[in-house]
Image: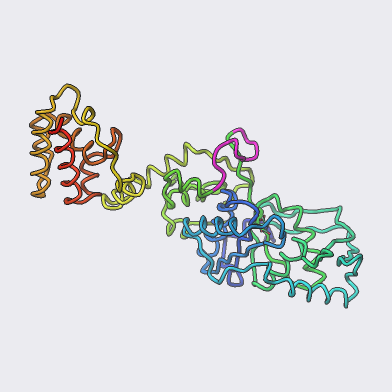
Amino acid sequence: MKLKNNNAATASSGVPPKAVIVRIAPSPTGNLHVGTARTALFNFLFAKHNGGKFLIRIEDTDLERSKKEYEKDILEGLEWLGITSDEPVMRQSDRLEIYGKYAKQLIAKNLASEVDGAVILKNAQTEISFNDLIRGEIKFEDVPSELVILKSDGTPTYNFAVVIDDYEMGITHVIRGEDHISNTPRQILVIEALGFNRPQYIHIPMILAPDRSKLSKRHGATSLLEYREKGYLPQAMFNYLALLGWNPGTEQEIFSMAELIKVFDIAKIHKGGAIFDEKKLEWVNKQHINLLSPEEKIKIIAQEFDVKKIPELDTEKICWKDTSSEETLEHLIESKKIIENGDDLMPYAEREGKGNVLWPVRYALSGEEKSPDPFTLIAILGKDESVKRIEKAIESLSQK
Ligand code: GLU
């Protein structure tokens, strides 16, 4: 006997019938939230896994709340993760005429009417159900009999604009947060009135705080770029976000983007909420740091540690513990010679006592008591600048 199976399980098996086209459709009413970044990432992985397209659409029809600076933050955050649109970014505010055109079609077909300048879609159905690739069939029994599609100021409502844009962009799969489940039947009403085909729907679980409440500011950073400021690697963030509500079903936790694209299987997205755990993110970040080459590590340290300027040297701080100024001076002079010759400082430091030698050299190079080790600093600064800085320390110390 052949079993008929229409639900999630078939989503992963077999190639999707049409070329996959998906999108992320952020509203620029705030900075890029980690939840939106994760939704973008699932869309991106799904598109790339299937050789399809990933598109970005800015939903900026709420003219009062939408801000260009938020749009910039969103696009910058996505780009930092390596998520870019396969076509020019679309903006709803550029498309107001198009929404008007579709509204007129509905009025002409007597499916919508104008009331006080607004356009309202009429609906005779009371029930709508749709298939969600993760959740199976979802049924709504209280479908509204009227739906505003254009407001009196001529701007479209969210549920109207989404349908038209998804249609015109050829979106095959709508992958978005489960907070949009209740919008889906309204969008289906518009789809049916306009005679479009339904996309596949995939509603993904929300990101929660460790106490399972909605992730908010009080739990820490919710804006993606705050994690860049904190020094996380984009590839670590990408890896961590991919694991929020999804896993490949193996023990592997550390992935490159290419590996994730290869193994990403939309049917393995979880139904339950995903907990954002910064400790875990830190761990993932460490693993990615370990994967870097020494040159890449130094580049990252250089970005984080400001080596451009050097504070006034405090001659009290140059000397290690109770090493005398005279001794320290001697070590600095010798170290300078070694560095100038391009030789390794370590044998000398080992002979004279690591602290005695490496502490003043490090302090001379960074002007700080806390900084990367002198070898890293020399690599960042280069020989000439390192020698110059040590000379300056020698000068300060000999004037003492
Ligand atoms: N503008 C909506 C949001 O930011 C998009 C929802 C959708 O993907 O349809 O949540």
Give the residue at x 56% y 48%.
Answer: 34
In the figure, 279 relative to 10: above or below? above
Looking at this view, name the residue that lies furthest to the front: 399
Q: Which stretch appears magenta?
A: 211-223
Give the residue at x 57% y 40%.
Answer: 275
* Residue 234 shown left or right of residue 100 in the figure: left
Q: Is residue 217 visible?
A: yes
Q: Image quadrant of residue 85?
A: bottom right
Which colour assignment does the render follow?
rainbow
Residue 257, given in percent of the width and then of the height, sits at 44, 57
Screen quadrant of the C terminus = top left
* Residue 238 shown left or right of residue 27 in the figure: left
Question: Can residue 369 be found in the magenta stretch?
Answer: no
* Residue 278 shown left or right of residue 385 in the figure: right
Residue 65, given in percent of the width and then of the height, sits at 69, 55
Predominant secondary structure, magenta span:
loop
Q: Image quadrant of residue 60?
A: bottom right
* Residue 60 shown left or right of residue 328 in the figure: right
Question: Can residue 215 be found in the magenta stretch?
Answer: yes
Give the residue at x 24% y 44%.
Answer: 377
